[in-house]
Each structure stands twice: as C-alpha cells, then as structure tokens.
Amino acid sequence: MLRFVVRRFLGGVGVLWGVVTLVFIIGFVIPINPARVIAGRNAPLSVVRSIYRQLGLDRPLPVQYGEYLWHLVHGDLGVSYATNQPVSQALMQRLPYTLELVSLSVLGELVIGVGLAVIAARKQGSLGDGVASVVAMTGLTVPTFWFGLVLLYAFAYKFAFFPLGGVASASWVVLPAFSLAFTGAGFYTRIGRSSILDELNEDYVRTARAKGATNRRVLIRHALRNALRPVVTMAGLDFATLMGGVLVTEQVFGIPGLGTLSWTAILQNDLPMLEGVVIVVGAVIVVMTILTDVLYALLDPRVNLEATG
Amino acid sequence: MPARRGVARARRERLVRSSREHAVLSRPAVPATGLAEVSERRSGRAWQTWRAVVSRPSGVVGVVVTLLVVVVSVFATVLAPHSAYYQFPNGLASDGAPVGPSAQFLLGTDALGRDLLSRLLVGIQNTMEVAVVANVIAAAIGVAVGSVAGYAGGWVDVVLMRTTEVLLAVPAILLAGFIALVTQPSKLSLIVIIGAVNWFYLARIVRGEVLVIRSRQFVEASAVAGARHPQVLVRHVLPQVWPLVAVYTTLQFSTTTIFVASLSYVGVGIQPPTPSLGDLISEGSTYLTSVPRLAIIPGIALGLIVLGLNLLGDALRDALARRD
C-alpha cells in the first residue's frame, strides 16, 4: 500500500511539474512585456529596459527556467503586477474558500449522484427509476452558473434562507455547493445506475440471494461496493471540470476564492497572479486525483497495487 | 531493439497464416471487402443508426431541438422581430425600468430598452457559431493526436499522452484566461481558445480505440499488402473510429456550449454589446432581484439547447452500442 501511494505521489509530482512548465512556456510566449506593465504605459524606454534587466529577463531561457523552478519550490510565485502583493500570500488568503467549496461539492455530488443511482437501480422501470433519471438529466442540462443564479433568486432573495452572496455568514457555502453538486450529480447517477445493474447480474449476487440475504442487503452490502469503482474513476477524471465550475460559481456568489481572484487578474493584466492560480489549482487537482486512486484501491482489493502506477 | 523486431516477426508470421486462410493477398491492396460493398454497407449503417435514433421519443426530441437550434442559428437575423442593438425609446418605462412582455416585445426589453427576444435569437446564433467551429477544431485535433498516439505507440504515445495528462490537470477556463490576457476576446479568439483546450478527452478516447483496431488483422493485412503508415491510418483505421467520434463530439457539443456561455459570463468571452447567451445571463444577473426574467429566460434557452444536444448524443450512443 505504501509503495503504491508513493508511486502515485511521484506521478502526481510529475504532472505538477508539467503544469508548472506549461505555465512557464505560456508566460514566455505570451506577448506581454512584464517590464512595460510594471513601469506603466508612459514610462521612458530606458526605465523599461532597466526593469527588464532587474527582472532577469535578458538572461538565457534555461537560466530563467531554473530560477523560476528554484523560486517555486521555495514558495515564491512572484509579485502581483496590480497590487505589488506577493502572489503566494494572495493565494493563501483565497485558497480556504475555494477548498471548502470544492470539498463540499464533491461530497454532495457523490451523495446525490450515488443516492439517486441506488434509488433508480433498486427497481428498474419503477417510478423511482423514472424520477431519478429525470433529475439526473436535469442536472446534466442546467448550466451550473445559471442554476446558481436561480438558487440565489429563490432561496436568498424570495425566501431569505441564505445570504445573497458573499461569505459573511457561516451558511455561505450551502447554495454554491448545492448548485455544483446538483449539476454534477447527474453524471454519477447514470454511471452508478448502469454499474449497479451490471453488478446485480453477477454470480456473487445470486449466491448472496441464495443464502437468504434481503434485497436491501444485497444491494447495499454486496453490489454497491463493487459498483462504486467506475463512479470513483469518473470522479478522478472529473476534477478539472469541477474546479472550472467552482471558479465560475465563485463569481456568481461573490466568493473571494481563487476564481474571483483569477477573473480580476485577467481584467488587470496581472500575469503572475493568473499563473499562480493555475499552479495552485493544478496542485489541488493532482492531490484530489491521488486521493481518488488510493480510495479506488481501498474499495477494490483486487486492484493490483504493484502493477498500477 | 530485438524485442520489437521479435514482435514484428511474430506479427508477420501470423499475417501470413491469416492471409493463407482468407486469401487476402491474392487480391493485392484491396482488403477483405470490395469498395462497392463497403459503401453500400456504410449507407445501410447510417440508415440503421437514424432509425434507431428516432425510434424512441427522447431521440426525436433531441433531433427536433437540434434542428430548431440549427434553424435559429442560421436565420437568427431574419427571425428576429427587431434589431438586437436598437434601444427603443418606448423600451423603457418612465422610471427607467425595462418593460415586460407585450405584443411589440414578446419577451419584454432589457435594461437598455433593447428587444430581449431579438437579442436572444442573435445571442444563440453567436454562441452556436463559436461552439460549432470550436468543437470541430477540437475534434480534429483530438482525432489527430489520439490516432497518431495510438497507432505509432512507443515514445510518441508516451509524450502525447503525458501532455494530455498535464493539460487535463488545468481547468480549461483558466487556460482560456491566458489568451484573454493578451487580446480583446473576439469570436475568432474564442474559437481558437476553445478549440485549443477541448481536445484532451477525445484524444484519449480515440487513442484507446485505435489501440484496439490496430491489433486487428485487416490492419496488418493492409500493411503487408504494401500500404504505408499514413495510408493505413487514414484509409483503414480512422473509418472505424468515426462512429465513436460522432457520438463523443455530439455529447461534447453541449459541454462546449455551456463553456462558451461561462466564458462570456466571467467576462472573457464574446464582448458586449454583441449578444451571446452567457453575456445575456451575465447582464441579466445584475438585475436578478428586480427583473429576474432577464437572466432566467436566456438560461432556459441555453438549458433547452443543451438538453436537445444531450438527448441526441445519448440516442446516437445507444444506437451505435446496440449495433456493436
């Protein structure tokens, strides 16, 4: 188990290195002269040149890349063009909001998705099956950010159960997390349903039934555990999409997380800030993917921990 | 690479055996079936797929909605009752609030006194224009990368697949943000952005499929018959992949549409005053508490489009799955 985790971790570091390199390449290719942005539009060329040298941008590319990596491993992501604040400091202030929203959304997504899948698979073609599939299809259809707006209108304005945006009250996370969970759950309901139905046709289910296990017990104790494997796999592949959704949803609910940070950064041409967000979001996704892989292995003892790496 | 050579030899031997069985090589360059037979079977296949799609209600709904979207996208400016940009003097009430639905403005007006229905229709057109072209570009890149990776194998495969892994670890919308840093987003830049960031999944799916197809005997047969790699890939492998690509692209299409809208919503998409679905929702969200209609209606339109595309994609997938 430990070897498996270590190997997955190293793989994750590899992916993260790729993300970091991608960010470096984009920063190099993008036609923005950082010295010009810092000096301002009307600064004389000599000033721009001296800032250019100060930033070390006149040195060979490999040297710049090495220094960039060196700074990164020391937690130095540069300084914001717009606010002169260290990027890492800004990111640390914003990250907790995003993390809270992401983790609750994933949890909600799985609970709603798998719950509906169980209801649907319990009796194929029943009313529950029909309702579950309609709910799943609705979730797949409704654009997340728009659903967030509707929730805001209904449950923060018409019926003021929750705050109308912002994070002042402790219940701020409920509506945004639900909007993400509901729109993401449909996907898992579909996979979960067909996966449970497949499992119910397996021999071991028949054996369990023959031993006198109740339908409920067969479904929950026997079939569900195996049926969860594809669901977990899909969750692992879906994190980037979910993070994208989270970033947009933050804008809807006025949550001061990484999403709103990046949209402001784009408006202000704040390249280091946007790069910082990409790196941190990449790191979050990599960590979640590793956790998923470990969970996958725990769910299914048949997974060969040595071979998958 | 002795091991590689061993594999190649084993493959050749297997081929010679199979060619003896099927006498493929006695008719050089033409694989097991004649060309006329292939084209006839293909039209039959398309017809069967179509029948399967429309044989169930959800498939019919999918087809109808998709056709409607196509009609609106092509004829938006003809269908629109008014200009999408004109600010009607009577489009705002005396207190400056937008007027509700009436005979003149079927869905009412927006905060600047413009006809919401006209803006909606043109907005659908703009959104779909970007989504369609971007999706086609993404599909082309995905098929190219995936098939080359799967067919070539070896280090090409490793490099291409590691690259997609890295790109999959960054939300596409952030990658799009970089491009918005540099240029004022236009339809063209959006198409480039979305095309560039939406091909990863398809590349991986196509790669997996090509890996399977590559090991089939007709591929080896054509290689033995003297076809070069590009020819084998394009003539023999890719035709087998198209159904999968069609299904995936249709399903991906709805995601792309939402993506286009999301970009506009966070301000890095199609810029006002040009209407787009995301932009209409974004503008409307400012007046969410006073005039909820402005954000709700474009959202419903977007949802219906996505629903139609999803239903069509599902029906296609099931139809093709049943055939296999």
Image: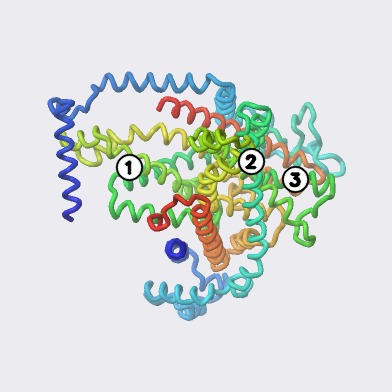
CB-based contact (under 8 Å), mark 1 and mark 3: no
Q: What is the total number of numbered labels drawn onto the structure image?
A: 3
Q: Chain of mark 2?
A: B
Residue shown at 76%/37% (left/top)? B109
| x 20%, y 34%: residue | B222
Gap between marks 1 and 3, in whole Å?
Answer: 45 Å
Q: Residue furthest front?
A: A211
Give the residue number, with chain letter if any, for mark 3: A151
Q: Quadrant of residue B297?
A: top right
Report if residue B275 is visible in the image.
no
Q: Give the x, y percent position of residue B42.
A: 35, 23
* Residue A303 place in picture, x, y as percent: 44, 51
Above or below, B174 relative to A185 = below
Residue type marked 1: Leu
Mark 2 to mark 1 CA distance (whole Å)? 39 Å
- Identify residue for label 1: B211
> What residue is drawn where x is 68% and y is 44%?
A146
Q: Nearer the viewer, residue B183 or A214?
A: A214
The image shows residue A308, relative to residue B224, as above or below, that is below
**In the image, B276: left or right of A76?**
right
Badge 1 and badge 3 both on one subunit: no
Evaluate whether residue A243 shows in this view. Answer: yes
Numbered tag placed on residue B86 in the rendering: none
What amino acid does circle 3 point to? Leu
What's the residue type where badge 2 is placed? Leu
Circle on res. B277: 2
Helix, strand or loop under label 1: helix
Give me the chain letter of mark 3: A
